[in-house]
Image: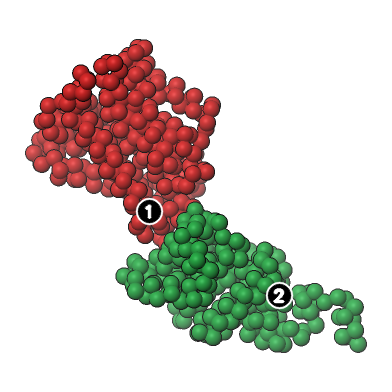
Amino acid sequence: MAIKGVSLSVAKGRIITLIGANGAGKSTILSAVSGLLKSWEGEIEFEGTSLKGLDPPSVVKLGISLVPEGRLIFPPLTVMDNLKLGAYTLYRKNEGATAAETLEHVITLFPILSERAKQPAGTLSGGEQQMLAIGRALMAKPRLLLLDEPSMGLAPQIVEKIFQTLIFLRDEGYTILLVEQNARAALQMADRGYVFETGSVVLQGETSELLEDQDVKRAFLGKDYGDFYEERQ
Amino acid sequence: MQEILQYIFSGITSGAIYAVIAVGFSMLYNSTELINFAHGEFVMLGALSFITLSGPFQLPLLSAFFLSVAGVACIGMLFERLAIRTVREPNPIVLIIITVGASIFLRGVGMLVWGKDAHTMPPFSKHPPLDIEGAKLLAQSIWIVAIMFLMAAGLHLFYKKTLTGKAMQACAISQKAAWLAGIPSKFMILLAFGLSTGMGAVAGVIISPITMCGYDMGTMLGLKGFCAAMLGGLGSLWGSLIGGLLLGILEALGVGLISSGLKDATAFLLLLFILYVRPSGIISSVNVERF
């Protein structure tokens, strides 16, 4: 069992981040919420509805979309097809008009995707693929967006751009749960953070407090031991 | 010259049928990475139910065609629902053995329902054969080739233009990613089984006027279709068509010019040859886009 005794809540319209080392159980939480994890014990609720026993498509229908680790776009299909498939549930509910509006919105967020609309998604750069993955998740019109390591393997400027987009999305009313190894960047952007260690939450709080916390600094923010020692004085 | 032309005509006719069967194999492989060795039995079910519906039941050809194809597609989906989806550990070998078992089962059902005698029916239309350079081209051959092209075009449009077709491709690329995008991948697999077995039934229907149809016709046709799919490149629509036609023509030429004993051997010699020389097939679906 990767996680045990974890309790966390995500308030509407905020960015919550889960940080911690590899294998601390952060991604397992996202797998459980998104329905990928088949059986888990405990209770997960979204807007008062239990997520127990739901498969991923049902979770998407409820309004939760996951941008998975490694992006998992459909490389041979065009960028536009990737986006449209993100709105599969909308089209099946005969909400094609909503899907078209959402597409407009995604394209204003990431204009590069409309320039590359007809290209196979596999030909995009890493950053563009991440934008496509976020765009595809947004196409389902989620109210809660889950992101698993969106900064992985990307250049710092691109990470900054993607994080700015997330802040913009929060200001538009989206609720975001972000799992990151890039703890500093994540804490600077998010409103609230949870620190994971070997399957449980060891620290939680507003990100401003966490950024100042000695243990967090030492373990995750890459402070040189000298700086750390001086600050303790 | 006239003789060669005649061989080529009959080769294209049987090749078109292999092509339709191969497309069924290919598209199922594409969506599920599964080789359905019961595919030939669905060809048999299509042929025999079409003969029954249009003969004893006196339905018009068109309604008999659609009814038998739809019926077989339903059986195909039932097969997926009952025998494939319920497997606890779906690893490829287990699933393939299940399809082999299903093939034996369906052959048994075919024998119980239609008996051991061979059945046949008149051609779709009564036009006299065309005379081209002294070689005879049967009207049924034109029907068969036309239906093959119609089906290929329909399938191409389905994959390129419809959301369901794209969702099916998405499931084939990554089931997890498709799931997370909200695509019900189990339903897509069910649909792929329906489409693939329905296509098998189409092959059975179009072949029924030119061959003797019995409960045991499916095995050889299924294997030939499989050879054609491998030849063209498993997973590729156009590859399957090319593979089917090539197999048909080479088979007919082998029978005509060398020996009639070579008929069934041609397919398997070709299969061995392609596996040695170019295992991914003429159009390899690994490099070329999947359809």
Relative to A82, A42 lies left or right: right
* Residue type at the position of mark 2: Ala
Q: Which residue is mark 2?
A: A183
Chain under disc 2: A
Q: Nearer the viewer, residue B91 or B34?
A: B34
Q: Are marks 2 and 1 in contact (CB under 8 Å)?
A: no
* Residue type at the position of mark 1: Lys
Q: Which chain is red?
A: B
Give chain A's shade.
green
Q: Residue at x 36, y 17 (%)?
A: B254
**Residue A214 % position (x, y):** 80, 82
Relative to B122, A6 lies left or right: right
**Residue A84 % position (x, y):** 42, 65
**Considering the numbered disc 2 on the image, is that residue within a helix, a strand or a loop?**
helix
Mark yes or no: residue B192 visible.
Answer: yes
Q: Residue furthest front?
A: B133
Question: Which colouring convention does the figure follow?
Answer: by chain
Q: Nearer the viewer, residue A145 or B44?
A: A145
The circle drawn on residue B160 is 1
Residue A90 position by quadrant: bottom left
Mark yes or no: residue B113 visible.
Answer: no
**Considering the numbered disc 1 on the image, is that residue within a helix, a strand or a loop?**
helix
Q: Residue at x 34, y 57 (%)?
A: B162
**Residue A4 % position (x, y):** 64, 71
Please rate how many residues cluster around mark 2, counting C-alpha atoms within 10 Å: few if below 14, some from 14 to 19, many from 20: many
Q: Residue at x 49, y 53 (%)?
A: A76
Compared to B20, does A232 lie above or below?
below
